[in-house]
Image (tube, rainbow, N blue to C red):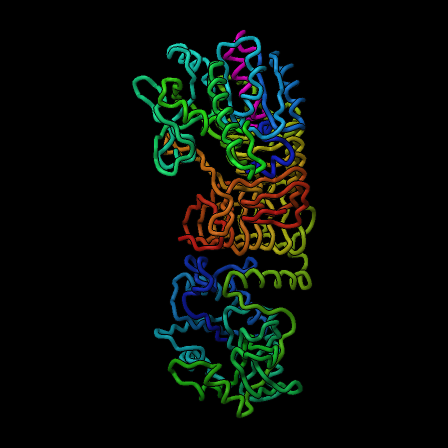
Amino acid sequence: MKALILVGGYGTRLRPLTLSVPKPLVEFCNKPILLHQVEALVKAGVDHVILAVSYMSDLLEKEMKAQEQILGIKISLSHEKEPLGTAGPLALARELLTDNSDPFFVLNSDVICDFPFEEMVKFHQHHGKQGTIVVTKVEEPSKYGVVVYEGESGRIHRFVEKPQVFVSSKINAGMYIFSPSVLHRIQLRPTSIEKEIFPIMAQEGHLYAMELQGFWMDIGQPKDFLTGMCMYLQCERQRSPERLRTGPGFLGNVLVDPTARIGQNCTLGPNVTIGAGVVLEDGVRIKRCTVLKGARVRSHSWLESCIIGWSCSVGQWVRMENVTVLGEDVIVNDELYLNGASVLPHKSIGESVPEPRIIM
Amino acid sequence: GTRFRPLSFEVPKPLFPVAGVPMLQHHIEACAKDIDVDFANHILQDLFVFHDCLFANECQVILTTCLLYLQEYSALSTAGGVYHFRDQILSGGPEAFFIMNADVCSEFPLLEMLEFQKEHGNTHVILGTTANRKQSMNYGCIVENQDTNEVLHYVEKPSTFVSDIINCGIYLFTPEIFQHIGLVFQKNQQDLLLEEQMNGWQRAEVIRLEQDIFTALAGRGKLYVYKTDRFWSQIKSAGSAIYASRLYLNQYHKTHPERLANNEEGRPTIRGNVYIHPTANIDPTAVLGPNVSIGTGVTIGAGVRVRESIILHGATLQDHSCVLNSIVGWDSTIGKWARVEGTPSDPNPNDPYAKIDSETLFRDGKLTPSITILGCNVNIPSEVIILNAIVLPHKDLNRGFKNQIIL
């Protein structure tokens, strides 16, 4: 089976991290975002993954070639030279997707959940129509596109984009499975799958909704990245609790790479991810943060709801909170206070940032 | 001392510890050091009742000088009180006497002022220093004859620029000053008789040295100014107490080196000038300074950082906490990993004549960022941030606060 992952462009919403590394390769809970999806796809029987990119990155190409070997599957890159919207990339990859009659997956690359790929195949084959959309329940549906469907069969009636009044709490989770015949509907030009393709398919009775169980998050921006991390770690607690660190100094769900070094009298968690080679000195307190590879946090500092970029150095007695994001190789001097600061790579911070702002 | 709240709720401003000892003690130590037999009597004038007498006794024992404590029965302003107690001041027949404001921080060049007075024919002397043009209008301004050092003109807090030489609030008078004050007193009495009794608060005895005496004495060959360029600052607000602490701590290298903490094995790391009371209990992994004063019985836990702050008696700073540009009140507690931080209001270091700003509390409807002050017995929970806040005494906080006064 095949899968098309809509990777897209520059990943601007996840800056400053994506100024150094293409978004699919940013580590989410110590594994590149893309790999979470790809590994789950492989487990469900996919042997060919196509990445639809609008910005070609050498780093991404190199990494994907390596993964081909590791996972034993084929990974292609489909590069759109001009923007094709959310449906156009399927047309671009038409040849690859239609070489047999198996259904294929289409995923939005920012989505994290307990991937239901096997169930999707079963569900899709059961109704036998052209398309299946995974839907998920959210608290604030009017921020998204809402899906109205029949509870029993899952047959979709219509979509409502950002409804003003409550229509339904189910939204499009960004994961689809299609029969190859769908490609007759899509041409090679900028096309929105939600606005142009889906409504017609729904009218013709060819679109069905499958409800996702468990957590779901679009981790395309730092705030949601951290929320998604909390959900994922909680899921790990159920699935594979042995991966999480426990004991004195660890509260709640904490994921620590084996090569990380933690000092005395630290308290980590709940909801902390510590990457490879990270050094935490004595007396550090971290809550609800991701610390990426090679970073160092010096003694007595206090971090909450932050993303610390690769190779950063955070000084002593520093306080950082409120979705502060440090890009790659940022140095924060001792005794500073950062509140909601978004710091671009290779920057040295010598002054506190008491109110949220961007530091270029 | 309402500008010194909430600290002045517990202790009258003159007794607030600056560089580890009560504000007033610096004045008394300067007198005891410089002055010998002629000035065995030190007179404290005050409005308050509480600890003052105790303080006076304490100082007496330490300094083996004679301290007389006189209490004003009502607010008589700067000269009125002095005039009221003229008999006590003149008992023993001194040739001259010093009058000093308690809320100034200075190197007290008293011997130099005495010399200057002798050289200038035993007139009255006022200590002056240079301020920058803009700030000078916040003080008493002195126009000086550069050759003779005579005070030609004096204006208290003018609204337009008069002079960049300002009044330091430290004076050296001869007994003859009482004649001038007496004249003003009589004039006030006559004015009151003439006026209808409209304002019941008006008293003849309310005489202001600055407005009533100096302005009259200026230009008549009676008042001279001794200019100093050594350190001087007013202590009007709590923020200026930290700045004054820095000045005095620096002076300790010369005057009281035993009051400065050193780096030693098994003791906390000391940076710059730090005063630690012997009864304080401090973990060796703490890092203190520059410009830190630690009071009696203070407990400081592991990995604590204190900088540019005053920690008052009995306070507890728990592990990994960080205190910057703040005053932590008596018996307060700061929880683990908490951050208590203020904004310094120091004078511009590039301007040698800049003085500390007596900032207004609010500007444009917002609280001006300033030194964080925790009143007595305030409890700060773990892991929160208290930034640019003033917390009134006996308050238990349950979260962080920024840019607020917490009642």
Going by the picture, which residue comes out furthest to the bottom?
Answer: A204
Q: Is residue B255 on the magenta stretch?
A: no
Q: Is residue B132 above or below residue A33?
A: above
Any part of residue B198 in sight: yes
Pinpoint residue B41: horizontal percent, then vertical percent.
58, 13
Q: Indicate the quadrant where residue B387 lies.
A: top right
Residue B20 part of the magenta-drawn span: yes
Q: Which residues are magenta?
A: B18-40
Q: Nearer the viewer, residue A239 or A1?
A: A239
Quadrant hosting residue A125: bottom right
Residue drawn at (51%, 59%) of the image: A27
**Residue A19: percent from left, percent from top:** 41, 58
Q: Residue at x 36, y 26 (%)?
A: B153
Residue A83, relative to residue B278: is it above or below? below
Q: Position of residue A68 (x, y in %)?
A: 48, 66
Q: Foreground: A351 or B58?
A: B58
Q: Is residue B162 left or right of residue A214?
A: left
Tell me how many marks there are. 0
Q: Is residue B71 above or below residue A229?
A: above
The reply to whether residue A1 is in sight is: no
Q: Is residue A134 left or right of residue A86?
A: right
Query: Could you tell me what secondary structure mostly forms the magenta stretch?
Result: helix
Q: Residue furthest left?
A: B147
Q: Position of residue B3 (x, y in %)?
A: 55, 38
Q: Nearer the viewer, residue A314 or A49?
A: A314
